[in-house]
Amino acid sequence: MKIKQILETQPQGVSFEFFPPRHFKTKDLLLARARALCHYKPLYVSMTCGAGGSTHGQTKDAVKLLLQEKSLTVVPHLTCISIDFNTARKTLDLYKSWDIENVMALRGDLPAGAQGREMISQNFKYGLDLVKFIKKNYDFCVGVAVYPEGHIQTSSLEQDLEFTKLKIDAGADFAVSQMFFENRHYFSMLERMKKAGINIEVLPGILPITNIAKLKEFAAICRCTVPKLIQEQMLRYSHNLQDMEKAGIELTIKQCLELKANGINRLHFFTLNKASVISEILNSI
């Protein structure tokens, strides 16, 4: 089923984002973790591509693996980096042959240390270009990313909104937000989008807080603020990573409960393939 239809018929639920295993021996572990989360009857699950398009091949393998679990609606990510028209067409044709109906169309992250946009495809420079290509040639339901604090390469929230509207007008069917740690950023983005006439569903992207160093590393590659209060609370446990994870999970639970209290009943989790962490959060909310 297409995600747009799922979201129209299911007013509450969760979705999960996984990343492809780097080694063959961990493939079964990925499937086991995905199956463990099937208990929560996810709206869908998605599979990422690595920075710089580094896991395009592994992404396809992981998607095929998850398709073994018939209860899951699987959504592959497709990024602009390191692909051309021919590669995109072959990949999308393959997904179509697997009866996949949904794709996330993304610009993608540049690898650490990359200068400029050397790795950006000449055919697809922006997520907008990929959305246009997919909608022109295929019948996929297309998801895109949106940014509560603005994309790191935009100069203002107004410019970010302008680019967001272009993607929606090109045919994007739903969106998932970049991670955020203060819910006011998400609600402000929704208000900006509403004023601009954008009315697609926007799932809030939740990154469980488990390690402050990793969290700051993720935030450094995007425009995402890690509040001082969170940093201070997490650093109290710098001597004990297990206690740090426990404290971070409590912060994530608080964030999710606040979203739910304000009428947001569908949440998208960047799982980092940590099924036990996600289960602990969901069991609490």
Image (spheres, helix red, strand yellow):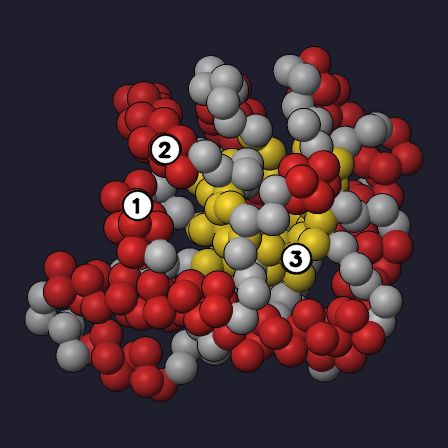
Residue type beneath disc 3: Val
Residue type beneath disc 2: His
| Category of crowding for the residue at label 1, using alpha-carbon neighbours closer than 10 angstroms: few (below 14), some (14–19), many (at least 20) | some
> First in sequence: mark 1 or mark 3?
3
> First in sequence: mark 2 or mark 1?
2
Q: Is 48 above or below relative to 242?
A: above
Q: Which mark is residue 39?
A: 2
| Residue under numbered circle 1 | 279
Residue 133 horizontal side relative to residue 180, left or right: right
Residue at 21%, 61% in the rendered image: 245
Between 2 and 21, the one lying in front of the other is 2
| Residue under numbered circle 3 | 202
Residue 57 horizontal side relative to residue 99, left or right: left
Mark 2 and mark 1 residues within 8 Å of each other at the beta carbon: yes
Question: Could you say whether the residue bearing mark 1 is in a helix, strand or loop?
Answer: helix
Q: CA distance from mark 2 to mark 1?
A: 9 Å
**Quadrant in which the N terminus is drawn:** top right
> First in sequence: mark 2 or mark 3?
2
| Category of crowding for the residue at label 3, using alpha-carbon neighbours closer than 10 angstroms: few (below 14), some (14–19), many (at least 20) | many
Q: Residue 177: horizontal and vertical position, in percent? A: 60, 60
Question: Could you say whether the residue bearing mark 2 is in a helix, strand or loop?
Answer: helix
Q: CA distance from mark 2 to mark 3?
A: 24 Å
Between 201 and 143, the one lying in front of the other is 201
Mark 2 and mark 3 residues within 8 Å of each other at the beta carbon: no
